[in-house]
Amino acid sequence: MTGTWPLVLERGEAGLAHEGEGRSGDLAVFAPTARGGLFVVIDGLGHGDAAADASEAAAAIITAHADDEPQRLLERCHEQLRRTRGAVMTLAWFDLADRTMSWTGVGNVEARFIRAGDGPDARHDSPVVLGGVVGYNLPQVRLGTIALEPGDGVVIATDGVTADFSVSLEAGVTAQALATRVLERHAKGTDDALAAAVRYLGPPARP
C-alpha cells in the first residue's frame, strides 16, 4: 500500500448486515495509490460468514496491490477467491495528477457519478460493468474515464440496495451524507447492504 488516503478524496460509507448475521459480506475498500486512491465496493456472494470471508480476502489483495493495472488486480483477486464462494465488485481509480476517475466492475454492484453542478433531474453516468463472479468466471474488464471537477463524486452500492438509488443523489452533499441517505432510503432489508461514496475536493480538471 502506498502512503495514506488523500485528504482531497472525501469518503463515507454506511452498511447493514443481513438480519441475524454477525458479519456482512459487503465491504468498502479505500486504498491509497501512487497517483491517488482506489475505491472499491465488494459483495461476497450470499451473506453471513462465507460471504464475509470472500469479501475480506478480496479486500486484502486490493489493499496490498492497489497500484496494479486493473485487469492484473482483478486476476489476483480471482485467484485468491477460487477457494471462497466468490464476489462481485466495482472499482474506481482516482488519478490526482491527471484529475480523472477511471472505473469498471464485475457483477451487479451499481455505481453512479455525481457532477458538482448536477440538478435534481440530472442523469448520472455509470461504469461498464460486465457479468461474472470474481473467483469463478472473470471477464476482460473495460475501463471508462471521467475528468474530475471539485465537488464531483461517485456512489457505489451493493445489490442489497435498490438500483433506483439515483433519485436520492444530490450535488454538494458530503460523501458520508450521500452514503447514509442511500442506505436509509434504498436498503432492501433482505440481504447485506452497503452504500459508499467518494467526493473529489481538489483542483479542477486539466484543460
Image (cartoon, rainbow, N blue to C red):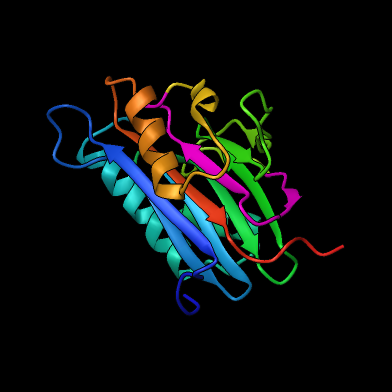
Q: Which residues are magenta?
A: 141-161
Q: Nearer the viewer, residue 88 or 111?
A: 111
Q: Residue at x 13, y 40 (%)?
A: 22
Percent from the top left, x then y, of residue 150? 65, 57
**Quadrant occupied by the C terminus:** bottom right
Displayed quadrant of residue 130: top right
155 over 5 or under it: above or below: above
Percent from the top left, x then y, of residue 8? 55, 66
Q: Residue at x 65, y 45 (%)?
A: 116
180 over 191 or under it: above or below: below
Q: Residue at x 50, y 34 (%)?
A: 109
Displayed quadrant of residue 11: bottom left
As drawn, the residue found furthest toward the right would be: 207
158 over 176 or under it: above or below: above
Percent from the top left, x then y, of residue 122? 67, 28
Is 127 one of the magenta-colored residues?
A: no
Is residue 26 among the parts visible in the rendering? no
Is residue 90 among the parts visible in the rendering? yes
Percent from the top left, x then y, of residue 41? 45, 46
Is 149 one of the magenta-colored residues?
A: yes
Q: Residue at x 68, y 53 (%)?
A: 102
